[in-house]
Amino acid sequence: MKQEFNWAMDQVKLPPEAEERILRALEDRAQAPRRKRRKGPLIAVLAAAAVLLMGAAAVWQSNLFQYFDSPGGNTPASLSQYSQPIGVSSTSEGGWTLTVDECIGDDQWVFLWMTLTAPENTELPVLGEGESFYLKSLAQSNDPENLWAGYGVRDILYDTVPGDNQIQIALGMAPDISPRGQTISLTIGPLDQRGGNLSDRVILWNETLVVENIPLDYPETTTYLTTDQPIPFIDGAAQLIALKISPFGAYAWLQTDVAENELVDPWDPALVTLELHKKDGTSLLLDFGYLGYDERPDDLPLMIDPSAVTGPFYISASWDYKDIEHSMENGSNYANLSTFIDPGQIDSVSLNGVEIPFVFDPKE
């Protein structure tokens, strides 16, 4: 019976109490006296377990969809399959509690959804027009061989129930190494209420709080394509070396005979364009993020042999699915909003007009 339970549990994530109920029901059935030709009770138990499983799957929905809910993106249900519940919390001496609820990410970015709860009977102020909450955060890895630390660079504070004692926080970070599989500590505080001018500041909570042992065990979400596909580029040609697609952005590495001094504007986003074609027939032309030009390969993926790349010039380009700076919506401070794209729903990509088939195949 436990094998049946383990197979089912591989399909969804359940709270511990739900797992226990299903396992207990299956074990009780296994210990009951066996009777010939009576399969009804077992079927009923398995059906009940399936109902519990389907109910839990329906209940679980990533709250990060509020951060990624932008035009051109996928539904919250698509996002939830890549998100990982965490449930680690810590309480300050003053009675404020931070709970890290969940995480999602790729081999560059990690995004956390958190809840900051003030002591009972505390009423946080209702934000007026032009006002926002502001909270500083600092993350640090616990791996001595892969130490990194940094402030959140994409963060939004939400007041989903104005006037209660909670605010919700979406925090994005991009360390120098893949955050997936890391265990981190997070320091936050203090919490401010700010107006349109930086001088309009009211301190609501004047402590710092550390949450330790936060596991970033989200699923692998990044696919790399390696190819020697020719790509039109200015008056010459380029060759695509590798393409990276994740739920949060795309990155391409190319080599070309065209020197940088031959370009009218090296920062022109039209030099390298990328469009995603989804299985539902829609397409999304990506917002240009960065273009690098060099006489040596720049941060090639590990699966690329540098000796096989001949140049003489190299281009690295990146695209964000959406990039909105200094958003004040939902009571947020400085933020870069991103649209989530389910890589499993991408059918092909077009790089400078050349369509390339895409298969979502993340590697561990």
Image: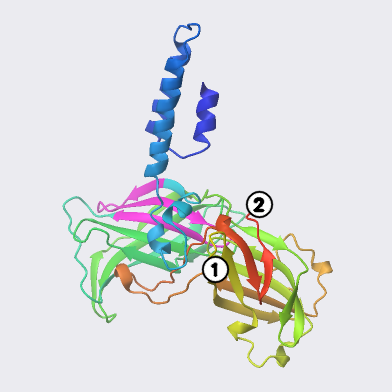
Q: Is residue 179 visible?
A: no
Residue pictured at 70% horizontal, 71% vertical: 253
Which circle marks residue 363 in the picture?
2
User: From the viewer's perspective, is residue 111 above or below residue 250?
Assistant: above
Q: Amino acid at mark 2?
A: Lys
Q: Which residue is mark 1?
A: 283
Q: Quadrant of residue 179?
A: bottom right
In magenta, the rendered stretch is: 87-116
Q: Position of residue 138 (x, y in %)?
A: 43, 63
Above or below, 254 relative to 62: below
Q: Rounded to the nearest whole Å, what is the CA distance between mark 1 and mark 2?
A: 25 Å
Name the foreground residue: 257 vs 94.
257
Q: Nearer the viewer, residue 127 or 222?
A: 222
Is residue 305 at all visible to an observer of this figure? Answer: yes
Q: Residues within 10 Å of mark 1 (few under 14, many from 20)?
A: some
Q: Nearer the viewer, residue 42 or 173?
A: 42
Q: Hey, what amino acid is under mark 1? A: Ser
Residue 119: horizontal and vertical position, in percent?
Answer: 22, 52
Residue at x 47%, y 54% (from the top left corner)? 79
